[in-house]
Image (cartoon, grey):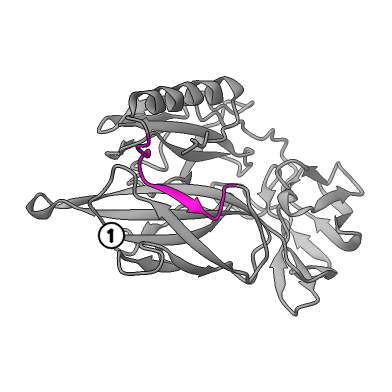
Amino acid sequence: MPSRTLQVPSNQFARTLHLVTVTLLLSLPSGQALAFKILEPAEQAVLQSGQTVTVKVDLGNDPGVVQVRYYWYGELDEALVQEDQTTSSGAIVASAALISRAQNDPPFGGTLTVPQDAIGPLRLLAVGDISRGRLGGHSTFDEILLAIEPAATLTAIEFETEKPWRLGRGHQEAGYGQVDTLGKIFEPPVVGLFSDGVARSIRSPSTGTSYRSSNDKVIKVHQREGLLQVVGNGRTTLTATNRGKHAALEVEVEVNEEPNEPPIAEAGPNRTVKAGTKVELNGLKSRDPEGEALYYAWSQIRGNKVSLLDVNMPKASFVAPQLSEPRLYRFKLRVTDKKGADSLPAFVDVIVEP
């Protein structure tokens, strides 16, 4: 069975992972599968919103799997605590789209419906629960990225906010978490109205949306990330374009005029670690041009959920889970300075090996 090379931002990192995968393949007896893997749908398959698809997994060398749970996540959605776990931290618990066992057809698979409001890249996470009898259990997982395209046509674009959009109240004091201040970053409140009557979030550039600000000295557009940043007071017209449709929003900004440059987040280099080791995510190289203290916010956006500690500290950490095959975990870091200005997100990939 062919291996699937995980896609990571760094070409060098991707080559390293490929060598790891090839080494594992060469060390296996002929015909033996790798560990737990999603066989259907295929990685990068193009599916439609609301489409019913068959999901199928290969247990590989994890024969102790007793059930498989399937979850849908957006491309950059935070991985949520799963329903078999208990938490006292108030974390949001994810609901499985499907729970399948050996008696299902296909075994440990079945049918899944692509979320009706999905559009653009969508992650499918399959978690196999492994029983070890009196020794307890653990889980294995595989995750693939799919491309979702609605069958319906886009009829209109809307900004879901008051019009005009007023940011700031003038002469306010800045601080951590403040909503409106120079340097603050926003996600455009954009939805697409489709001919099937479904409103879908098309905020992300990965859905085909681009933005333009008529006054870059008021609102700056970070096109690649699809984010808006307040850079000055005044008025601007924000335009969103997707599939030949356009929408315009008047924006009025009145915030504290104290000069402030946004901070820069640094999440550290990609790396490979061994299962069972403590992994430290290091954001200490993040910086603020004015030398202000920073507020840190770490989150996990790829891989089966891990218990991430100290998410609001420069260094966050987790214990690498026990796995049968190298798996990708991706984390995001955002930093905010004392005056309330935000950084663009930074990402770090961690490959966990058995």
Query: Is residue 269 visible to the viewer in this orientation of the structure?
Result: no
Task: Considering the whole magenta stretch, tell me its main secondary structure.
Answer: loop
* Residue type, mark 1 in image: Gln
Name the residue at 66% across, 35% down: 262
**Among all residues in the image, which is located at the extreme bottom?**
197
Side of 153 where 13 appears, left or right: left
Q: Quadrant of the C terminus?
A: top left
Q: Nearer the viewer, residue 170 or 36?
A: 36
Residue 258 percent location from the top left of the image: 71, 39
Q: Position of residue 115 (x, y in %)?
A: 59, 68
Question: Depth check: 47 or 230 in front?
Answer: 47
Q: Is residue 147 left or right of residue 333?
A: right
Segment tinted magenta in the rendering:
31-43
Of residues 313 and 97, which is closer to you in this image?
Answer: 97
**Magenta stretch encompasses residue 27:** no
| SS for callout 1 | loop
Crowding at dot 1, Cα within 10 Å, few <14 / some 14-19 / many 20+, comes out as: few
Residue 105: quadrant of the picture:
bottom left
Relative to residue 219, is residue 37 drawn left or right? left
Residue for point 49% across, 21% down? 16
Q: Is residue 279 above or below residue 156?
A: above
From this viewpoint, which residue is outermost toward the front? 30
Q: Toward which corner of the image does residue 23 lie, by quadrant?
A: top left
Q: Would you place residue 354 above or below residue 42 in this image?
A: above
Q: Nearer the viewer, residue 36 or 328?
A: 36
Question: Residue 256 location, x and y as percent?
Answer: 72, 47
- From this view, report whether residue 122 is shown above or below residue 192: above
* Circle count: 1
Which residue corresponds to mark 1?
85
